[in-house]
Every structure is written in structure tokens, then in C-alpha cells.
Amino acid sequence: MLAFNLTPSGPSTFILTGIPGLEAAHIWISIPFSTFYIISLLGNFTVLFVVSKEQTLHKPMYLLLCMLALTDISGSTCVVPKALCIFWFGFKSITVDGCLTQMFFLHTIATMHSAILVTMAFDRYVAICDPLRYATILTNARIAKLGLAGLIRAVLLVLPEPLLLRSLPFCINRVIPHTYCEHIAVVKISCGDTRVNRIYSLVISLVIIGLDLTLIGLSYGLIIRDVFRISSKKAHQKALNTCTAHICVILMSYTPSLFSALTHRFGQSIAAHVHILLANVYVLVPSMLNPIIYGVKTKELREKVGKYTCRM
């Protein structure tokens, strides 16, 4: 194990330390990491399998669930295998190109995930506030186009980050105190002028999260307005049940993301291992819980999953 930990850092190599201060507990930390990852893969692949097999689920709402499942699988897979290699075998080195590639895909997936949540909020708005036109407003083709637009937006906004980092000089200190190549963590080890990188990263984070949360808030504001115009308590309950799963996913996705982003930039008094654990929670926990939440709260999906489970 010591031999693995002493992997040399070449001129085109970074070293990922894992969770600083908790190196002695890496093996124990790997247990929840690997468990959450396996549950995430099983849950999200189950959603993809069931929706693909069941013709009755070929609807906009379930197409969005499949997009969400794909981003959850991709995001956790960007992080967990490398983290487990650090925890189990001490394989801490990563090439600069590999690091920037991991960063690009991870941030692109996170931005795409946010766009999907906005589209899901719009889906819920149309389903509750204009149900008679739902089938004409939100077709599968339109959802696919919105997904493509979200992907293009993510790539265009995130691509400058690794390109700007590629032009920075990195001196003797090539140690990244993290389990993966998070943008700000890599910026901090550069010995060049990082003001442009920091400003761009902060502005993009605020624009993406601010814009997307505003659109989600607007959708739910309109939903609440229309629901309270209806006197029926049964209708209120139905609308609440329709939105509960999506609201839970929003809270799980944005809360740790905002906290992690803010503590990385402004929380110097918070211990380093707390930063890193929060950053990993942001990647792992939502991807594990999203399919469980939708499986429990969506009756049609729950029944179809039960159907295939019983066959096994």
C-alpha cells in the first residue's frame, strides 16, 4: 500500500489526496461510497430498463426521468471509481488531461441535471395548470429537443473552464486535496493569475443556479396560484402529490450544491475534510435517492417496477 501512495508526480500529473485529514479512515469511508454507488446504479438502471420496456411509460414525464437517471449514472461514475482507487489502492495520480476531462464531464453533467429539473418543473406546471393541452404542448419530440438544448447550453458554459485552466502554469505543488478534480480545487494549486478563472466560475455558477431556480420558482408560483383558485381539497391533495417527488429532488440537488460551492469560495474556517465530504455527498446522495423517490411517489412507475420484480 505504501508503494502505491508514493506514486511520483510527473510534469503532466496531479495527485488527488482523497479526504485530507481522514486518510486513516479511507477504507471505512469507501464502504458507504461503494454502497451508495451500487444502489444508485441499480436504481437508475431499473428506471431506464422499465421505461424502455413499457410502452405505456413512453411519455414526456418518464422521458425526463430517463434523462435524470442518465445524468445521475454519469455524474457518480465520473467520481466514484477514481475515489475508490484512492481509498483502496492508493492510486492517487491523475494526468492533467485526465483531470481536466473529468472536470469538464462532471460540471457539464451537473449543468445538464439542472436543466432537466427546470424542464420537469415546466412539465408539472403544464400538467396541473393546462392539462387539456398537455399532450400538444409537451410531446416526446419537444422534450427531446429541450434535452438537447440543455446539453448544448451545458457544454458551451462549462467548456471555457478547462480551457482557461489549460493555459495556467502549475508549479511544484501539484497536490489536489480532493477525491476528484473539482474546478476551484484545481484553480487553487495554480501559481499563475487565476482571477479570470475564479470570476468566470462564480459568474457561471450564479447564472446557472440563479436562472434555473428562478424558472423553477416561477413554475411553482403559478402552480400554487392556480391550485388555490380551486376550492376542492381533493384537487389540492392531487396537485401536491404530483409535485412532491420533484420538490424533494430539487432540494436534494441544489442544497448541497449551493453549500459546497459557497464553502469552497468563502468558508475558509470550515475544515477541509468537511468541504470534501460535502462535495461527495452532492454527487452521491441525490443520484442514489432520485430513483427511490420517484419509484415511491409515482404510482405507475412503482407498479411497473413491481411487475418486473415479481417476475424475478
Image: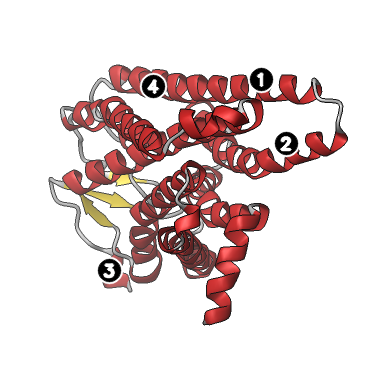
SS for callout 2: helix
Give the Cα distance between marks 2 and 1.
Answer: 12 Å
The amino acid type of the residue labelled 1 equals Leu
Question: Residue 64 location in percent, x, y?
Answer: 46, 43
Front: mark 3 or 4: 4
Closer to viewer: mark 1 or mark 4: 1
- Mark 2 sits on what residue? 239
Numbered disc 4: secondary structure: helix
Helix or strand or loop: what does disc 3 sit on?
helix
Q: Residue 204: give its label.
A: 4
Task: Name the residue type under label 2.
Answer: Ala
Which picture quadrant has residue 252?
top right
Disc 2 and disc 1 in contact, CB within 8 angstroms:
no
Residue at mark 2 to residue at mark 3: CA–CA distance: 55 Å
Asked whether, in this view, residue 107 is left or right of residue 65, the answer is left
Residue 163 versus residue 306: which sits nearer the camera?
A: 306
Residue matched to label 1: 222
